[in-house]
Amino acid sequence: MELNWPYEPSNWSSFLGECAWYLVPGLALHLVLLVPSLPVFWFLLRPLRASGRWLKVALVFHATLLVAGMLANGLWSCVIRGRLYWSTDYISDFSAFYPISQGVIDFRFGDQAGALNGISLAYLNGIWMVFALGVWVTAFLVSGFYVGRREVLFFEFEQRGRMRFTGER
């Protein structure tokens, strides 16, 4: 595929560097979003409230979301950005929280602007959706395994569906 701009796409040797580019803005965003998500975790993980483990699950979820986002950004940068589209103001184009907008692509830096390379913005955002779903599903699965194997094991169901704390093993 011939590119319509003078840009050299990232190659696999820069994968870890591209993952690291996500860390600083991603960490700031995840820390900001951690605080409003705590009441949601507190409500959803009612059985774990007595032991305080709901907070550990929330932290595992956010840490996994950050690491999966870093890996997805590295993959995005090496496979998608620079081949299907280009943007001039690049820190981290991939985010699991919001798709690529036309504003990101049209942003001017000096006399240059980004562009789509023979695809529509809807198509690009469809690809973004696959990446974002992978990040979110990974975070839910890892934190779910953490809950299922480490935390819920400390509770046993009594008759009539009540849970009773049995203590740590």
Image (tube, rainbow, N blue to C red):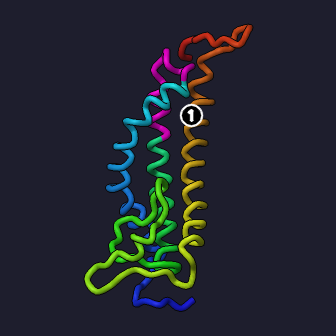
Q: Quadrant of the C terminus?
A: top right
The foreground one among 65 and 168 is 65
Outermost left residue: 110
Q: Residue at x 61, y 16 (%)?
A: 155
Left or right of 164? Residue 42 is left
Which residue sits furthest right?
A: 159
Residue 88 versus residue 46 in the image, above or below: below
Q: How far across and down, in percent of the image, does residue 122 sit?
A: 57, 70
Q: Quadrant of residue 113?
A: bottom left
For the image, the number of numbered tags is 1
Residue 161 screen position, x and y as percent: 71, 13
Residue at 58%, 60% (x, y): give it: 129
Q: Amino acid at mark 1?
A: Tyr
Which residue sits at x=52%, y=84%? 117
Residue lying furthest top: 159
> Would residue 19 be counted in the magenta stretch?
no
**Placement of 150 over or under 32, stated as above or below:** above
Q: What's the residue at 66%, 11% (across, down)?
A: 162
Q: Quadrant of residue 109?
A: bottom left
Q: Which stretch did the figure color magenta?
A: 46-61
Q: Say which quarter of the image contains residue 46.
A: top right
Taking depth in this image into account, of 105 and 141 the one nearest to the observer is: 105
Looking at the picture, tell me which residue is in the foreground, 104 or 3: 104
Q: Residues within 10 Å of mark 1 (few under 14, many from 20)?
A: some
Q: Is residue 138 left or right of residue 39?
A: right
Of residue 35 and residue 141, the one placed in the foreground of this image is 35
Residue 105 image position (x, y, % from top left): 42, 75
- From the viewer's perspective, is residue 138 above or below residue 59? below
Q: Is residue 122 left or right of residue 10?
A: right
SS at circle 1: helix
> Which quadrant does the N terminus fall into?
bottom right
Q: Which residue is mark 1?
A: 146
